[in-house]
Image (cartoon, rainbow, N blue to C red):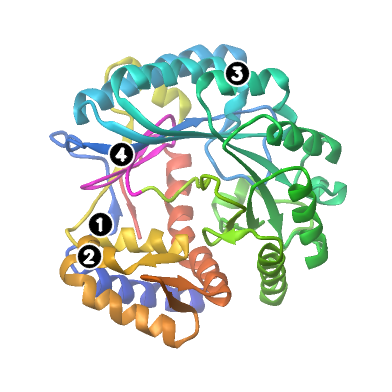
Amino acid sequence: MNSLAHAFSHVITRAARRYLVGPDQRWVFEPPSPDWTPPHIERTSLYLHVPFCRHSCPYCPYTKVRYREPLIEPYTRAALAEIDWWAKTIGPTEITSIYIGGGTPTLALGSVTRVLTHVRERFHLTGDICIETNPADVDDETVRRLHDMGVELVSIGVQSFQTENLAVLGRDYNPLVAEHALALLSESNFASVNADIMFALPRQTATGVTTDLARAMQLGANQLTTYPLFTFPYTSVGEYLRLTDVRMPNLSVRRAHYRAISEWCAEHDYERVSVWGFKRGAVPRYSSVTRDGYIGIGPGAGSHLPDGFVLNTFDLDSWICAMGEGRTAIALRLPFASEMSGWWWLYWRFYDTRIPLDGLDVALGHDAPKARRWLRIVEQAGLAAHTDGYIELTEPGAFWLHLAQNHFALSYVNTLWTKARREPWPQAVAF
């Protein structure tokens, strides 16, 4: 984006968020004040970040470090200490779901098992446990250990079953490895098995994308999560992500691929459950993001609390040191004005592609009429329709939302993560 277009976008974004959220919301992440403590929480979710990878995929922007066995024990002790810190500050909360991401969590299943045991000791776990994995790390022993841990929902980062696409993505294994791993998971009695499939890759066709979807279906995936290569802006965060001969696909390519995915999923009984996700049958929905609140454990983990959003230091050593000294690992905090929580709720309902109309008044209070006006505009534009008490995005609506998310929301992530990656304890990040 050129400088003039960027400046125009910034002005429009500031005007829109001021209109929606109000002038009291400051858009600045800063270190939490010394007297701040998280509020008591009765129910929330938990995210565990396991940063270890054997191979650093060049398109992945998440906090990760090269897997080395000596790092596992210090990481585990710090994670246990952070669970204790949260338990002391928010109380014996009910945990309604656990999401384990990375990195590659299945590289450190012994550590994850100890952490989950401690979560059960300090909190009241009532929901599903979800975990990410990588095709090269799935075998019979992995499956057994996941079941022993109580994992019910599994996601495998297939990305593609085609050799040329795996080469572009820096994956150095044969597609047969991904096929075997997905088949093994599908046959192993998990409540839900999700396969990640990427689209808009260099020289990839829409037919190539649907061929990957069909193979995932044949191998037993009951949920498919599809997303483009350039989910995160390739600017400053992209300094360590650049791929050889890769360029942002033009709009028509992305649009054609997304339409082909939507049509294929509809034809094969996969219903849309998010902007990116489709599931088949009455299985639990696998989602990494759409929780109304959560606490984060691990370096770079975020927490969505009733009074705002906080982010741990991204630096593994700094995080381990902070927890070893009994300090908080939270590096930055964005407090929420009173209106912000409701609009945050509505944003994630758009991500779900279904907005429950009976939830608007509860979530947004006096801002609910304003939200309804915006929803009417969305309907009139043909981007959504009424269905049984919901406003549901149409296929074009879901596509344009994913573009808006890339352009606006993820540019915020880019700004924040760039600073957090460079400085373990940033002083401020403004938007």
State the image coordinates of residue 122 (x, y, percent, origin top left).
29, 20
Q: How far is disc 1 from disc 4 in space, using C-alphas?
A: 15 Å
Q: How far is disc 2 from disc 1 in space, using C-alphas?
A: 8 Å
**Residue at the farthest left position:** 35
Magenta-colored span: 292-313
| Residue at the spot 19% in from the left edge and 69% down from the top edge | 23
Which SS class for mark 1? helix
Tell me the residue that label 3 is attached to: 145
Going by the numbered disc 4, the residue's amino acid type is Thr
Q: Nearer the viewer, mark 2 or mark 3?
A: 3
Which SS class for mark 4? strand
Q: Decide which of 348, 27 is in the foreground and name it.
A: 348
Would you identify the image quadrant in which residue 12 lies? bottom left
Tell me the residue that label 4 is attached to: 44
| Residue at the spot 72% in from the left edge and 20% down from the top edge | 140
Tell me the residue that label 1 is attached to: 341
Going by the numbered disc 3, the residue's amino acid type is Arg
Q: Decide which of 280, 175 is in the foreground and name it.
A: 280
Q: Decide which of 332, 353 is in the foreground and name it.
A: 353
State the image coordinates of residue 296 (x, y, percent, origin top left).
38, 35
